[in-house]
Image (cartoon, helix red, strand yellow):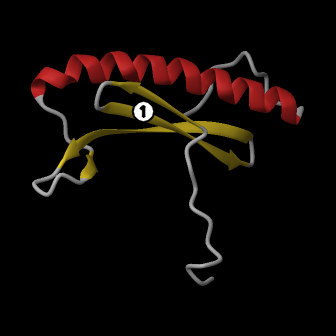
């Protein structure tokens, strides 16, 4: 597939706490839809361009942990909704696999 015909995949939702973000991605499996989460931090490089990294300072870890909890809750809700809409046989009240 050429670059011109490729579409860039985007997260279904992004949660933020300042420069830290949690991107929620929808995935499909044989058991139905589920949502995964990636974390990153936005910063400006020496040229002033915005960049993302997956490295966090010690002072950012508590904020990251709190954002992770919110992302967990949101991803679980999105998965539950997707599975309910798909009418899968999975019990949507069971623990949602990430």
Whether residue 94 is visible, yes or no, is: yes
The answer to which of 48 and 39 lies nearer the viewer is 48
**Which residue is located at x 74 percent, y 48 percent?**
30
x then y, percent, for residue 62: 23, 16
- Quarter holding the N terminus? bottom right
Judge whether 2 appears above or below 49 on screen: below
Q: How many marks?
A: 1
**Which residue is located at x 57 percent, y 61 percent?**
8
* Residue that badge 1 annotates: 22
x then y, percent, for residue 74: 57, 21
Judge whether 78 appears above or below 49 on screen: above
Task: Judge from the rendering whether residue 85 lies leftward or rightward of residue 69; answer left or right.
Answer: right
Quarter of the rendering containing residue 95: top right
The answer to which of 48 and 80 lies nearer the viewer is 48
The answer to which of 81 and 11 lies nearer the viewer is 11
Judge whether 56 appears above or below 54 on screen: above
- Quarter holding the C terminus? top right
Task: Judge from the rendering whether residue 26 lies leftward or rightward of residue 50; answer left or right.
Answer: right
The answer to which of 2 and 64 lies nearer the viewer is 2
**Which residue is located at x 62 percent, y 65 percent?**
7
Quarter of the rendering containing residue 3: bottom right
Task: Judge from the rendering whether residue 26 lies leftward or rightward of residue 59; answer left or right.
Answer: right
Q: Which secondary structure, mark 1?
A: strand
């Amino acid at each position: 597939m050429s670059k011109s015909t490729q579409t860039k995949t985007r997260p279904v939702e992004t949660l933020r706490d300042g420069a830290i973000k949690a991107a929620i991605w929808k995935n499909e499996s044989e058991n139905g839809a589920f949502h995964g989460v990636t974390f990153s931090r936005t910063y400006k490089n020496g040229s002033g361009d915005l960049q993302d990294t997956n490295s966090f300072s010690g002072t950012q870890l508590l904020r990251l942990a709190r954002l992770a909890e919110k992302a967990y809750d949101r991803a679980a809700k999105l998965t539950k909704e997707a599975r309910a809409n798909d009418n899968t046989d999975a019990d949507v009240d069971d623990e949602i696999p990430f």
